[in-house]
Amino acid sequence: MFRKMRRKDKRLSREQALEVLEAGEEGVLATVGEDGYPYAVPLNYVFHNGAVYFHCAPFGHKIDNMAFNPKVSFCVTSGTGIIAEEFSTRYKSAVIFGRAQEVLGDDKIDGLRALVKRLAPDHLPAGEDYIQRDLRKTRVFKIVVEQISGKTAH
C-alpha cells in the first residue's frame, strides 16, 4: 500500500520519526482537490493522542480538498541546514500518511488546548479565553496516522 523508502541507510526508526514529528515547529499538509491538483500548505500543529491536530478557518482550499478526499500527507523537517562544501543538506524529516477528520465538541476543545499548550505555553489563561471566544469560528481537524516514515542526512 505505501512505498518502501529507497535509501534505507538514511531511514529513521518509527520512534525517531515520531520524535521529529513531536519536536517540529510547523509542518506542510498536502491534499488533493476535485481538479486532481495537489495543494500543500504550511501550518502549525500538535502531535496529540497519537494524531496530528491543527486548526483553521471555517472554509478554504484545504477544507474543500479534505471534504473531497480525506487522504492527506503531512511532512515535518528539523535540524535543516546547507552543507555548502559538501553540496549537501543536513536534516531530519518525518512524513505521515493518513486521513483527516474534523473533531467536534470536547475533542475540539481538547485539540485547541493541546495547540495552545504547545505553541503558547506561557499564555495558557489567555489561550483558554481565546478558545472560548473563537470556538464557533474555528475548525479543528486531526490526521489519523496510517503510515509514518522518517529520514535523516548528516
Image: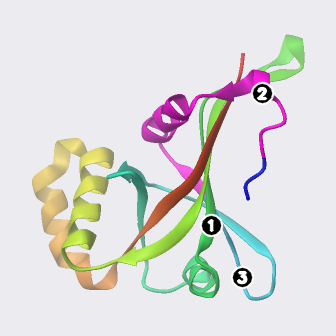
Point out residue 21 in the picture as x, y percentages from the top left corner.
Answer: 50, 41
> Residue drawn 24% across and 70% down?
107
Residue segment shown in magenta: 4-28
Specify the quadrant that holds the C terminus: top right
Marks 1 and 3 sit apart, C-alpha to C-alpha, by 11 Å
Q: Which residue is label 2 attached to?
A: 8
**Residue 61 in the image, given as x and y percentages of width and height:** 62, 81
Q: Which mark is on residue 72?
A: 1
Amino acid under disc 1: Val
Q: Is residue 125 above or below residue 131?
A: above
Confirm whether the magenta stretch covers residue 20: yes
The stretch drawn in magenta includes residue 9: yes
The reply to whether residue 25 is visible in this rendering is: yes
Residue 91 seen from this side: no
Q: Is residue 75 left or right of residue 84?
A: left
Q: Amino acid at mark 3?
A: Gly
Task: Using residue 90 as the reference point, say whether residue 97 is left or right of it.
Answer: left
Amino acid residing under circle 2: Lys
How far is mark 1 from mark 2, CA to CA?
Answer: 24 Å
Image mark for residue 124: none
Furthest-front residue in this view: 1
Residue 72 in the image: above or below residue 80: below
Residue 13, given in percent of the width and then of the height, sits at: 58, 29
Give the SS element for disc 2: helix
Which numbered disc, 3 or 2, marks the residue that appears first in the sequence? 2
Tell me where residue 51 sits by quadrant. Answer: bottom left
According to the picture, the residue beneath numbered tag 3 turns out to be 33
Tell me how far mark 3 sits from mark 2, CA to CA: 32 Å
Marks 3/2 in contact by CB < 8 Å: the verdict is: no
